[in-house]
Amino acid sequence: MLHHSAASMPMPDTETLRADFPILDQSVNGRRLVYLDNAATTQKPLAVMLTSRHYYEAVNANIHRGTHHLARLATDSFEKARQTVAAFLHAASPDEVIFTSGTTGGINLVSHILALSGRIGQGDEILISTLEHHSNIVPWQMLCERTGAKLRIIPCHEDGTLDQDAFGKLLEGPVKLLALTWISNAFGTVNPVETMVRAAKDAGALVLIDAAQSIAHLPTDVQALGADFIAFSGHKLYAPTGIGVLWGTLPLLESLPPFLGGGEMIKEVTFEKTTYNEPPFKYEAGTPNIEGAIALAAAIEYVEGIGLDAIHEHEMELIRLAADGLSSIPGIRLFGPAGRSGSLSFNIEGVHHYDLGTLIDQMGVAVRTGHHCCQPLMARFGITGTVRASFALYNTRQEVGELIASVDKAAAMLR
Ligand code: PLP
């Protein structure tokens, strides 16, 4: 297993890195697996798997409150993981890091506490964009149903970028919250979050950034960004499923009410009245995913050992190569702008995306087909889905070549 040191070092060659990901070393239908479904979930490096194993072999106990050795060890490891996440996000304090089950869990938590606090109510507006994943649509629709607030949608242009003029006009309304994805999981569009966050804050709105797709591709500095909340999932950052993070500013977390009640989130309980713990514990009722949090910290250390900038540069080269190569296939339509990151979506005229995906899987190439949990975006473009190739640090130029060749071949067979 590789131990990478300084973040400024050039990225180790991809074949060396691939040795850290044993799952990649397998054949599918007699061909070496080409895994290009990383926007759905990334594969896990040995460093993460061994951390999980070590946790259960040497550390496992329930955290906080325990006086025995293992309880202290597990608590220390869990809280150290929180510090690692806080440093990764450039958060002002580890107390701003709430461990959740994932992006969906984080966004739903925010939607509930905003409703409970009365900060969003009848006649208020919540702004989302056409590019959002269902996880950043449905919780807000549910909140609107409960409170009488209204959902407003920032439209997008044909190239999959958001209409900034329309955004500016929408901000003139009674907007209480902007909930925006940083990178589109469907088209790879990178939203200009810095300027959009500033504009929304200037208009007096709270801002939640869905960082599910950006977290493994772009460095995140929550203080520079200036949003109020950021949610992401560990499993898209080379960590296990079932663990994620909601970051929020401490003053906000202190002032908002808890959502789930139970153990850990309390200061004192009597049958008459309960007082609540401070953040982050106030939002972590019940036994959390202890091993997941510790493994997430291992994944962050792994990524930082290579350097997110180097990873991003590598992935951007692959995605440009893929876009260039695929462009020459007759009848192809690429979605999203040229500077797309992480994901590349396309369709071929006269070919169903599902058929194309199935056929290239038979050639060993794993991509995703369908609506990518973005049905309103698909409807905006008059399509039911796309084929999506999405990239990670371990993908190679050769794999891009295999993607292009398999799509070319499959399209010719299906047309
Ligand atoms: N938001 C975006 C942009 C996503 O891509 C995803 C997952 O694909 C999610 C939210 C939901 O993430 P999870 O299912 O891990 O909660």
Image: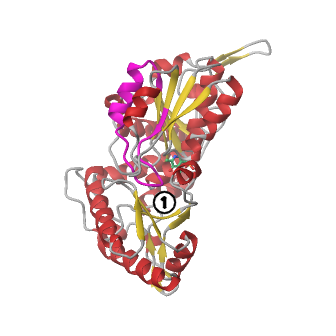
Whether residue 185 sits left or right of residue 355 in the image: it is left
- Can you name the residue that lies furthest to the right here? 271
What residue is pinned by disc 1? 49
SS for callout 1: helix
Q: Quadrant of the N terminus?
A: bottom left
Q: Residues within 10 Å of mark 1 (few under 14, many from 20)?
A: some
Image point 48% across, 81% down: which residue? 410
Question: Of residues 177 and 302, which is closer to you in this image?
Answer: 177
- Can you name the residue that lies furthest to the top here? 272
Image point 50% across, 58% down: which residue? 41
Image point 53% across, 28% down: which residue? 280
Whether residue 12 sits left or right of residue 273 in the image: it is left
Question: Of residues 266 and 180, which is closer to you in this image?
Answer: 180
**Residue 66 shows in the view:** no
Instruction: From this view, report whether residue 67 is shown above or below residue 339.
Output: above
Q: Amino acid at mark 1?
A: Met
Residue range in magenta is: 179-206
